Amino acid sequence: MTWLRIALAPLLLLAVLWFADLEDVLRQLHRAQPGWLAAALACSVLSNVASAWRWRSLVRWLGHGLALARALRLYFQAMALGVLLPGAVVGGDVFRAVALRRGGMDTLAAGLSVLLDRLSGLWMLWVLAAGAAAWAWHGGAQAAAARWGLPPFGAAVPGAVAILLLAAPAALLAGARQLPRRGRLAALAQRPGAGAEFMRQLLQSTLVQALSVGALACAGRALGVDLAFWAYAIAAAPTFLMAALPVSFGGWGTREAAAALSLSPFGVAAPAAVAVSLLYGLMALPQALAGLGLLAWRRDEG
């Protein structure tokens, strides 16, 4: 199926650009302000550095030593594979797990570290989006809610979702720790420091996603799309999720389609939304090239 992804990925992006009006998208990109672009790049880099730090925490909790410098190198190498090869983040995640396995980590634990790292990020992304929706509804979005035919007490719904999303992993962890110590997964859940690691993941993933949303917001500001941070936080959840699906190169096409749909309720026209998403995606390219350079350097060194 790889050849099908290779064929469909550019077609998907072209279809989104055609729908949004390519000329209008290009006009939007032409007006990008360099200062905001630099801020978007800084947020994107810091988000990935924080992601590597979060993954290293999981690896160390699972019993394998991993220096921060090596975690950063592996993370950006994996990012290069995820951006430049078909399959979005999947190829990079496999690379990280294999690298840990070659470094002496148990196969299950290596794969679990990458899976939990990915789930930790997606979990906090939706917590942040639900929390932002509750905040917006409570803090002044009632008029918009009325226009959409939504009830005035609607803030309770995303608020409850945010609380449930926060509580569910903690409840699962607490339940797993009460089970008989059978099976390797149950043993991992009962490792010492599981509660402390859960709190570290909560804080680290909050930082990662806040910086990622910040990168998206700065890309929007570069094009004059002046929305509140909470609006970008809500739109980021479906946008980032679609970008992570293993159906394209680096999320190109799926991310832009999701951005057009998720920013539309906030009054952002499709050409501007697609342009914002393209700028956000472009922030990953210099980082991917740096990771590719690290891959080549390590190969030459070997």
Image: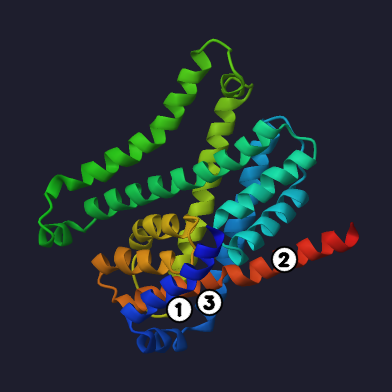
Where disc 3 sits, the SS reads: helix
Instruction: Tell me where residue 82 appears, x and y as whole percent.
Output: 60, 59
The label nearer to you, 2 versus 1, is 2
Residue 220 visible in the current orientation: no
Amino acid at the residue labelled 3: Leu
Say which residue label 3 marks.
Answer: 37
Asked where in the image residue 2 lies, by quadrant, the reply is bottom right
290 sits left or right of 43 in the view: right
The residue lying at 65 percent from left, 63 percent from top is: 80
Please tell me which of labels 2 and 1 falls first in the chain. Answer: 1
| 24 and 170: which is toward the camera | 24
Q: Is residue 27 left or right of residue 40?
A: left
Earlier-in-chain disc, 2 versus 3:
3
- Decide: marks 2, 3 in contact (CB < 8 A)? no
Would you say 288 lies left or right of 201 here? right
Q: Residue 291 versus residue 249: which sits nearer the camera?
A: 249
Which of the numbered marks, if any, corresponds to residue 285?
A: none
What separation in Å lies between label 2 and label 1 (alpha carbons)? Answer: 28 Å
The three-letter amino acid code for the residue at tag 2 is Leu
Residue indicated by mark 2: 292
* Res. 168 visible in picture: yes
Up-down relation of residue 216 to residue 242 (above or below): below
Mark 3 Cα shell of 10 Å, populated few (<14), some (14-19), many (≥20): many
Circle 1 residue: 222
Q: Are marks 1 and 3 in contact (CB under 8 Å)?
A: yes
Kind of residue at badge 1: Ala
Q: Element under label 2?
A: helix
Location of residue 237 (image quadrant): bottom left
Label 1 packing within 10 angstroms: few (<14), some (14-19), many (20+): many
> Which quarter of the image is occupied by the C terminus?
bottom right
